[in-house]
Image (cartoon, grey):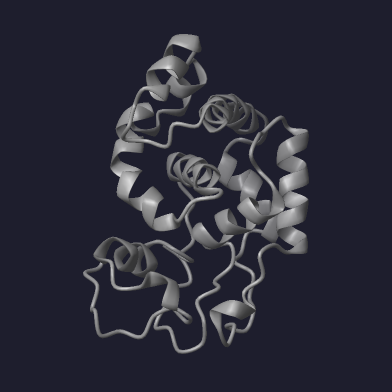
């Protein structure tokens, strides 16, 4: 992780929180190809629906502990006792639908890995293996909530049994994992690294 220079020009959503700045500078919009990290982002984005991203980042480490260090096979094996345990865990977002969706999505994630070889190969195929190249948006208000690509991804994920994966959530995931770079004009990450 690169130490953040607080004087760098950034997207306005990063604000002044050290946690948000570090996420903006070191993760958001930078291509991610590690299946475990992709699963973490999928889960966190699904829990974020209806909440602020700052809330999710503050709870991120506790999510990691509560969900077995993002061990996908272990999460896929969770049952009713695990759901009950997680519903009592104040360190995460205690939403039964989102918890149950995480377990189901772990099972679906493993099925994709078995079929395609990796979730990375599967999800990046929606952008032909490369980040979408677009002009940096002039203002944050110009960034779309969803796109044709995120609509297609959401439909395909739902067809495979995934839950809590609408077009808006899928576009947030695409931004998070660098399938698209939506850093705005003037942000130092608008022309950041091409790959990691």
Q: Is residue 66 above or below residue 77?
A: below
Q: Is residue 98 above or below residue 169?
A: above
Left or right of 65: which side holds 119?
A: right
Q: Nearer the viewer, residue 37 or 23?
A: 23
Left or right of 158: which side holds 79?
A: left
Whether residue 104 is visible: yes
Task: Name the residue rendered at 40%, 23% in the picture.
Answer: 86
Q: Quadrant of residue 85?
A: top left
How many numbered discs?
0
- Location of residue 122 in the rendering, given as x and y in whole percent from the top left corner: 65, 44
Task: Name the residue rendered at 55%, 50% in the picture.
Answer: 50
- Location of residue 181 in the rendering, given as x and y in whole percent from the top left corner: 54, 71
- Location of residue 26 in the rendering, given as x and y in whole percent from the top left corner: 34, 65
Q: Is residue 125 above or below residue 132?
A: above
Q: Quadrant of residue 60?
A: top left
Task: Name the residue rendered at 50%, 32% in the picture.
Answer: 95
Which quadrant would the N terminus be assigned to in this image?
Answer: bottom left
Whether residue 1 is visible: no
Task: Name the residue rendered at 64%, 33% in the picture.
Answer: 112
Q: Nearer the viewer, residue 61 or 17?
A: 17
- Location of residue 183 in the rendering, given as x and y in whole percent from the top left corner: 50, 76
Left or right of 112: which side holds 91?
A: left
Which quadrant would the C terminus be assigned to in this image?
Answer: bottom left
């Amino acid at each position: 992780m690169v130490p953040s220079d607080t004087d760098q020009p950034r997207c306005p959503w990063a604000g002044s929180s050290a946690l948000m700045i570090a996420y903006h500078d070191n993760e958001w919009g930078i291509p991610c190809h590690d299946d475990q990290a992709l699963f973490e982002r999928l889960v966190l984005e699904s829990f974020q629906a209806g909440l602020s991203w700052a809330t999710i980042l503050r709870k991120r480490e506790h999510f990691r502990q509560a969900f077995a260090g993002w061990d996908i096979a272990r999460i896929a094996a969770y049952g009713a006792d695990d759901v009950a345990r997680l519903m009592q865990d104040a360190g995460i977002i205690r939403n039964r639908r989102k918890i149950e969706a995480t377990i189901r999505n772990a099972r679906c994630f493993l099925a994709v890995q078995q079929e395609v070889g990796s979730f990375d190969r599967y999800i990046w195929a929606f952008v032909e293996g490369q980040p979408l190249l677009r002009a940096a948006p002039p203002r944050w208000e110009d960034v779309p909530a969803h796109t044709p690509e995120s609509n297609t991804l959401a439909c395909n994920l739902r067809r495979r049994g995934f839950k809590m994966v609408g077009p808006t959530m899928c576009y947030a995931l695409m931004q998070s994992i660098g399938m698209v770079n939506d850093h705005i004009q003037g942000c130092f990450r608008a022309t950041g690294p091409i790959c990691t």
